[in-house]
Image (cartoon, rainbow, N blue to C red):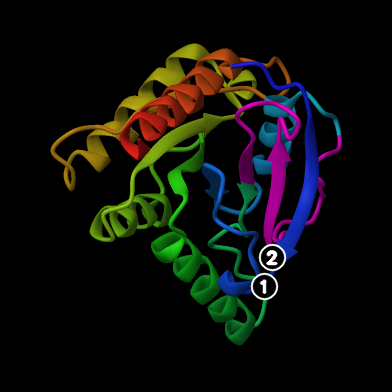
Amino acid sequence: MQIKSAEFFKSSSLLSQCPAPDKPEFAFIGRSNVGKSSLINMLVNKKNMAKTSATPGKTRLINHFIINAEEKRPWYLVDLPGYGYAKIAKTERGKWEKMTEEYLSKRENLLCTMVLVDVRHEPQKIDIEFCVRLGELGLPFAIVFTKADKEKPKAIERNVSAFCNALLEYFSDMPNYFLTSAEKKTGREDLLNFLNNVMMEWKKQSK
């Protein structure tokens, strides 16, 4: 897949405020400070489309970006608030979680949720629990391991294997997963090809 254009479209605090569900859509989510904005910018090849910050938890809305708006197959990339950030009020965190779960469970044109996981760490309970919740809701998802340039290959292999084994305690099959580095653009083509294949399959089933 080629990305010829990528632009911010709309921010929403409620599912009802989101754009009309008339285009295929992929959501990106992960723990705060997982490198989500950097990965999105690398994916669309645009330096500052998703705003990066030194302070975790800055994404607080459902942010839609329209990709290839002038082409035959435009689609939405959605930047969701990170989960697991503790330095906010419980009421505010609860509001984010409710907004995110409503979006994930009810957004009819959402084809796949991309769950970002920092490959430098051993499996984190909160990441596993989030994946299990998606499974309980019957929602398709893929794992995107981030920051591969910041760890040694053997440690990466060990952490990826440990994460896969942890997920397989709850799932019969491992979902698709990708190893990425925003800095080195590792995994970009594989990830774009995956998104394209999902869209092509969705288009077939929609006929």
For image coordinates 73% across by 35% down, the residue present is 69
The local secondary structure at tag 1 comes to: loop
Q: Quick one: which residue is furthest to the left in this view?
A: 172
Which segment did they paint magenta? 48-77
Q: Which quarter of the picture shows residue 204? A: top left
User: Residue 41 at x, y = what percent?
Assistant: 75, 32
Q: Is residue 147 magenta?
A: no
Q: Quick one: which residue is furthest to the bottom in this view?
A: 91
The local secondary structure at tag 2 comes to: loop
Question: Of 69 and 132, which appears nearest the observer?
Answer: 69
Marking on residue 13: 1
Q: Do the residues labelled 2 and 1 touch (CB within 8 Å)?
A: yes
Q: Main secondary structure of the magenta part?
A: loop
Quadrant (top left, top right, bottom left, bottom right) of the C terminus: top left
Amino acid under disc 2: Leu
User: Residue 47 at x, y = what percent?
Assistant: 85, 30
Q: Is residue 129 visible?
A: yes
Q: Mark 2 points at which residue?
A: 61
Q: Which quarter of the picture shows residue 86? A: bottom right
Q: Decide if residue 51 is on the left or right side of residue 142.
A: right
- Classify 10 Å Cα crowding around label 1: few (below 14), some (14-19), many (20 and above): some
User: Residue 32 at x, y = what percent?
Assistant: 62, 54
Q: Does the magenta stretch include residue 61?
A: yes
For image coordinates 56% across by 70% down, the residue present is 15
